[in-house]
């Protein structure tokens, strides 16, 4: 079932948990189950702590391996959504945030 995401204004973003896909402006993006868990959390919350991501992937935060695992899959998500007007930024010592590519937030 398609669910509409209202976090990103002026963009038609919908997602389907059953098929691990995201539809941005009527263009379909398919994700692996791990990638989809990450993008799904970002679509739900916008900004997500690393602890929530670890829990979502059923990983233990006992060493750098879990963080590297998240980073690897987040890079895959980034590469897939880049052409569709979205980006994922790392928030130092916190987690990740989903933003439109044209956003200038955080610049000083």
Image: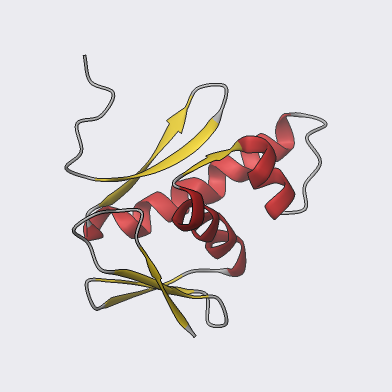
Q: In x, y percent, where is residue 5?
A: 38, 64
Q: Pick whichever, 17 or 33, lies toward us.
A: 17
Measured as percent of width and height from the top left, residue 107 is found at: 23, 20
Q: Quadrant of residue 50?
A: top right
* Residue extending farthest top: 108
Residue at the image point whose x is 39% and y is 50% from the top: 78
Residue occupying the point 69% across, 37% down: 51
Q: Nearer the viewer, residue 8 or 108?
A: 8
Say above or below: 18 vs 9: below
Coordinates of residue 8 in the picture (x, y in percent)? 30, 53
Q: Going 55% across and 69% down the picture, which residue do you hit?
A: 32
Name which quarter of the figure residue 62 lies in: top right
Colour theme? secondary structure
**40 left or right of 24?**
right
Q: Where's residue 100, x and y in %? A: 25, 47
> Quick check: 33 left or right of 89?
right
> Which residue is at a point 45% across and 32% down the rendered structure image?
90
Q: Nearer the viewer, residue 70 or 93?
A: 93
Please state, as top left, top right, bottom left or bottom right, where the C terminus lies in the image.
Answer: top left
In the picture, measured across the screen, residue 53 lies left or right of residue 86, that is right
């Amino acid at each position: 079932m398609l669910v509409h995401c209202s976090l990103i204004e002026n963009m038609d973003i919908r997602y389907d948990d059953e098929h691990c896909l995201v539809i941005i402006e009527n263009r379909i993006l398919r994700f692996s189950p791990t990638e989809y868990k990450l993008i799904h959390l970002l679509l739900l919350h916008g900004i997500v702590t690393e602890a929530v991501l670890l829990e979502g992937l059923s990983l233990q935060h006992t060493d750098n391996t879990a963080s590297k695992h998240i980073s690897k899959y987040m890079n895959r998500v980034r590469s897939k959504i880049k052409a569709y007007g979205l980006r994922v930024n790392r928030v130092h010592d916190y987690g990740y945030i989903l933003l439109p590519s044209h956003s200038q937030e955080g610049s000083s």
